[in-house]
Amino acid sequence: MEQLIYIGPNIFRLGMIRNQVYLEGLPGSVKWAVETFPELGELIVPASEFDTAQRQVRTKGTHLHHMYEEVTRKAGIK
């Protein structure tokens, strides 16, 4: 099973920590968070795609940047 990494903003109340690595799938609390806020799932990427995904999060106009901004807005961050 490939490692996954969350590249979104810290949302402590949901247990979502930026750059958190998941070694054996997603824990139940993260699955619940993704069901509640589907955009979070877009920000959990395979470790092999981490560098590319990080660049996309920082690049305006990309899908991952939009997802990051949407999660930030919905979580009330900023």
Image: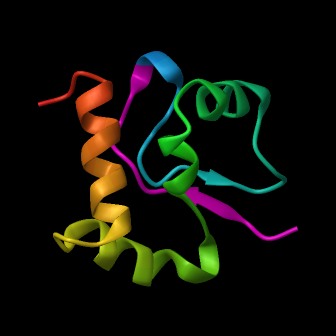
Q: Is residue 56 above or below residue 6?
A: below
Number of callouts in the render?
A: 0
- From the viewer's side, name the closer residue of 61 and 56: 61
Residue 9 belongs to the span the image colors magenta = yes
When asked about the image quadrant of residue 28, the answer is: top right
Point out residue 16 in the picture as x, y percentages from the top left corner.
49, 34
Point out residue 18 in the picture as x, y percentages from the top left corner.
41, 47
Q: Is residue 74 left or right of residue 49?
A: left
Q: Quadrant where the C terminus lies?
A: top left
Q: Characterize the magenta stretch by its predominant secondary structure.
A: loop
Q: Residue at image x 84%, y 53%? A: 24
Residue at the top extreme?
13
Residue 42 belongs to the span the image colors magenta = no
When asked about the image quadrant of residue 7, the answer is: bottom left
Q: Is residue 1 above or below residue 78?
A: below
Q: Residue at image x 69%, y 24%? A: 32
Q: Magenta segment, which residues?
A: 1-12
Residue at the left extreme?
78
Q: Is residue 32 left or right of residue 9?
A: right
Point out residue 14 in the picture as x, y percentages from the top left corner.
51, 21
Residue at the right extreme?
1
Which color scheme is applied? rainbow
Q: Is residue 54 above or below residue 77?
A: below
Q: Quadrant where the N terminus lies?
A: bottom right
